Image (cartoon, rainbow, N blue to C red):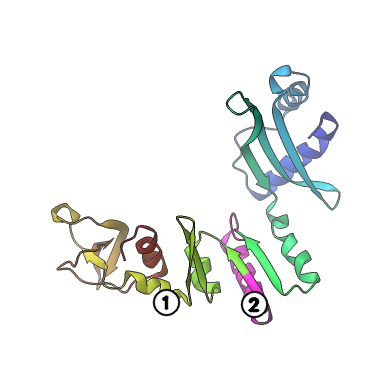
Amino acid sequence: YTADRIPDVLQFERDLRKEEDFWGWEIDEKYIADVAASFEDPAFANSLSLLAYMDGRVVGRIDSTKICSHFDGSAKAYLDWICVIKSYRHKGIAQALIGDPDVLLLDEPTAGLDPEERLNFKNVIRRIKGDRCVVLSTHIITDIESLCDRILVLCDGRITAFDSCGALADVARGKVYAVEDTADLATPFHSMGPVTVDGKAYEKIISKAPLNAPALEPTVEDGYICFIEKLS
């Protein structure tokens, strides 16, 4: 991002506002003047911004700060802000599919998508995953449950494989309970939030020790928590 790119970036910010109008500043004359002045101000010498162009316009931006350290004599860049226009976030998937790859790697592909966009993306993956290997890296449990046939969990530097979502959920079997009041529990537990059973409100918890409480069918999230917290 250099001073000559300011008009492109201003248009990028206007395009962002067409999608979501929650930005905390206005693109007025003062704002434009402040941005232009920042390229002459030595206080911004360690600022580093990268722009992504597609179809002749800016569609993404990363802002970071370079910090020089006497500790190891290095200069590192620390991420401050990243934003991509929604309609361009997953065009790379379509481009990758043009080559008909045997393996498709997707990193957090549904992050930032609204419900309709997420559904459209999932439908695409369901259609293509039958004749190729699709590797999905994500922390969104619903994506795993709806798309993944097998699961790899990275914990403490080790990868553990599960043959299905059910296999991961089974890690928590017999450890998920619905309790009315956790204040009287004498055993350690992990709270999973409120749950309704037969029209009655409970708190869903995971406990390694058996409890005299209604047992619940475990979910993939329950199994994941049991696994990483070593409650199995």
**CB of mark 1 within 8 Å of CB of mark 2?**
no
Q: Is residue 18 visible?
A: yes
Q: Label 1 belongs to which residue?
A: 166
Direction from residue 14 to residue 125 in the image, left or right? left
Direction from residue 55 to residue 103 in the image, left or right? left
Q: In the current view of this chain or complex, which residue is farthest to the front?
A: 72
- Quarter-wise, where is residue 22 in the image? top right
- Location of residue 144 in the rendering, given as x and y in whole percent from the top left corner: 51, 68
Direction from residue 15 to residue 214 in the image, left or right? left
- Quarter-wise, where is residue 184 in the image? bottom left
Question: Is label 1 in a helix, a strand or a loop?
Answer: helix
Q: Earlier in the sequence, mark 1 or mark 2?
A: 2
- Location of residue 212 in the rendering, given as x and y in whole percent from the top left corner: 14, 68
Query: Which region of the structure is painted magenta?
Result: 108-134
Question: Is label 2 in a helix, a strand or a loop?
Answer: helix
Q: Residue at x 29, y 56 (%)?
A: 191
Q: Residue at x 72, y 36 (%)?
A: 49
- Location of residue 136 in the rendering, given as x and y in whole percent from the top left corner: 59, 66
Specify the label residue 129 is tagged with.
2
Q: In the current view of this chain or complex, which residue is farthest to the bottom?
A: 130
- Location of residue 55 in the rendering, given as x and y in whole percent from the top left corner: 84, 53
Residue type pointed to by label 2: Lys
Residue type pointed to by label 1: Gly
Q: Is residue 66 visible?
A: no
Question: As displayed, is residue 195 above or below residue 146?
Answer: above
